[in-house]
Image: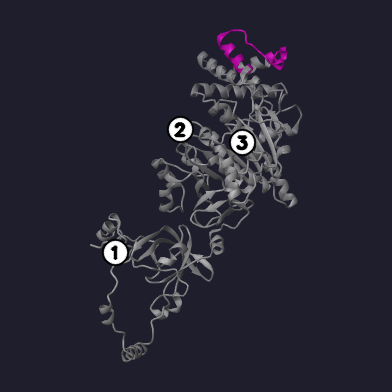
Amino acid sequence: MIDNKEIPALSGEDQKNIHSMTDEFTTQLDEEVALAGGEWQEGEEFAGAVGRTMFDSPASKDNTVTVLLPTDQICKVPSQSLIRIKSRRKDKGGDGRQYLGAVVEGPFAEPDGLRADAPLVVTTTVRGATFMPRYHGRVQVEIIGEELDGVIEPPRFRPLPNSPVFGLLDEETRTLLGLVNDMDLGYAVGFEKMSVQIPSKRKSVLPRHVGVLGTTGGGKSTTVSGLIHQFSNAGIFTVVIDTEGEYTEINQPTQDKSMLRLLQRIDRQPDGVKELYVLHLVGRGTTAKAPTNIREFSLDFSSLSPYAAAEIMELSDAQSDRFFKAYDVTKLILRDLGIFPRKDNKQDEEDVLDLNEFEAGYPMITLSYLIDIASFILSSITHNEPNIFNDVFKSEQAHKVLEKRINVVQTNNEISWKALLGKLWRLKRLEIFDNPKAKPIPFDNLISPGRTLIIDLSDTDSTIVNNLVISDILRGIQNTQEIAYRKSEQEGKPPTPIMIVIEEAHEFLSRDKIAKMENLFQQVARIARRGRKRWIGLMFVTQLPQHLPDEVLGLINNYILHKITDVNVITRLKRSIGGIDDGLWNRLPNLAPGQAIVSMTSMSRPLLVAINPTPCKLRMID
């Protein structure tokens, strides 16, 4: 048992008994050392090494090796850092291969020759004794690849034991990880100050779509607003579907004390986005205030795919059957009356032939037209006088056309027609379709590099309305960008990049609803696939990733994962997101606010990142 008593000094008699070694002995010792080849020196291949590879054990895993570090080198190999392993030279019995690896576990400190929980260590520590054995560091390294002529190739072998390990400088690490770009996300955790950047104009990154997932309070809004600010600076046109009215003041610098302190720490200034427009539905309010550019907008019913409309209104099978009968009859009547296609108008005829009703509605059809026709069909069943609201249907000629078309409609069931009319009237009373007080969003005039468009839906209080708006916006942006893309190809210059941010994405495309909204999802999927080539990126933001269907997760290639505590959600995400090691997954439930696991197609491997504070003002920040 070791105690803390001071060791007594040697007495004078004891000191007399201590003799120095004779010259003869030291001379003989020097001769023995010379005969043995001189003093031991570490091989030149180990010069500058921070550690060495260890032997494998029964617990070893494929594609990972254990590296041991001297005490003074532990701090040089932080978590997530890259290291280079030079397998022993061929003249030393090795294969001479060179590997690149990443630290996925550790560094851990372990006592030399003892277990960390050895009785000697535990007992002396508990008793307050001073006992600090020599110790070393240990890290677990995942092999990224084998370096051959400056190219990283998939590894075919493993580094040999006792091979030297070298740390990489920060700049080389950033280059190899693909972090040197123009948009700052934050700083890699475990490094003193290693900036994590993504490219703003590389078509293989942002247009391949982004998922920002995490529980409430994890920092999603800070991440999103910071990205919007950088999109603006990078010349990207950004559209934000804001269901809470949280981003309507991001044209102002942040006033939050915590954000100001964090910005000062990284030597940045508070700043708002340069050009902001806030749009809200006609007759609804907005959280934006002057002098912000605020505009009302309505929806054009003819632009909405009837299949998507039927799904969003959640029509039953019987109601859906009658909806499409009324829709088809309305199209025929518009043709008969010369409303569309107009008589002798070849362009209108071509538009009808090219029409894909899975993507858009019939031109010139309105919700009120549809209600009138459905009411006329119901009156033919009940033998009551119909209530017609559109003057175009009130003339004697129009009545003859209506009777002719409706008499051939084979239908019955008064209850289903009344139920359908009830849902159509609910939409009509919202006064968001074909409202003369406001026009649809003119994307062809609004799309501009660096401009930010906030669609404020905070006053709708209706998932159905929100979904109708989102569907209309996605279709409108896609059509406008298609035209711009063809024009840019002719002119030999790229189109304006577009990023669409969908907040609370689980309410738009939930896991429970997707089986009933197949056409709506297919519309989103078409936009996602085509957008990758035409520079339209989608960003799905949600605090409930468990509600996102696998089909939506399959559209996403870039992820920013904030704190997620649900084990089932993490397990499901593991199946969808590749390349994230178990060490990072294990840290996900305990991430601090503002930390996130970032996996981008421009990065060689995912990293744990401290996301930069936002310079913009958020309305609902705590």
Q: Quadrant of residue 395?
A: top right
Residue 537 visible in rendering: no
**Circle 1 is placed at which residue position?**
114
Residue on which disc 3 sits:
247
Identify residue for label 2. 512
Q: Position of residue 404 (x, y in %)?
A: 64, 16
| Residue nearest the viewer, comparing 104 with 155 | 104
Q: Nearer the viewer, mark 1 or mark 2?
A: 1
Q: Nearer the viewer, residue 66 or 114?
A: 114
Q: Residues within 10 Å of mark 1 (few under 14, many from 20)?
A: some
Task: Residue 231 in the image: state x and y as whole percent.
Answer: 64, 46
Q: Residue furthest front?
A: 12
Look at 39% across and 42% down and name the residue there: 567
Q: Residue furthest right?
A: 344
* Residues rendered magenta in the picture: 372-399
- Helix, strand or loop at label 2? It is loop
Give the dominant element type of the magenta stretch: helix, strand or loop.
helix
Residue plotted at (67% across, 38% down): 252
Q: Locate residue 81 relative to residue 492 in the image: left or right.
A: left
| Amino acid type of the residue tagged 1 in the rendering | Leu
Instruction: Name the kind of residue labelled 3 in the image.
Output: Tyr
Query: Residue drawn 45% across and 52% down?
Result: 580
Location of the N terminus by quadrant is: bottom left
Image height of 109 relative to 529, above or below: below
Amino acid at dot 2: Asp
Q: Are marks 1 and 3 in contact (CB under 8 Å)?
A: no
Question: SS class of the residue under badge 3?
Answer: loop
Relative to 142, does residue 285 appear above or below in the rendering? Answer: above
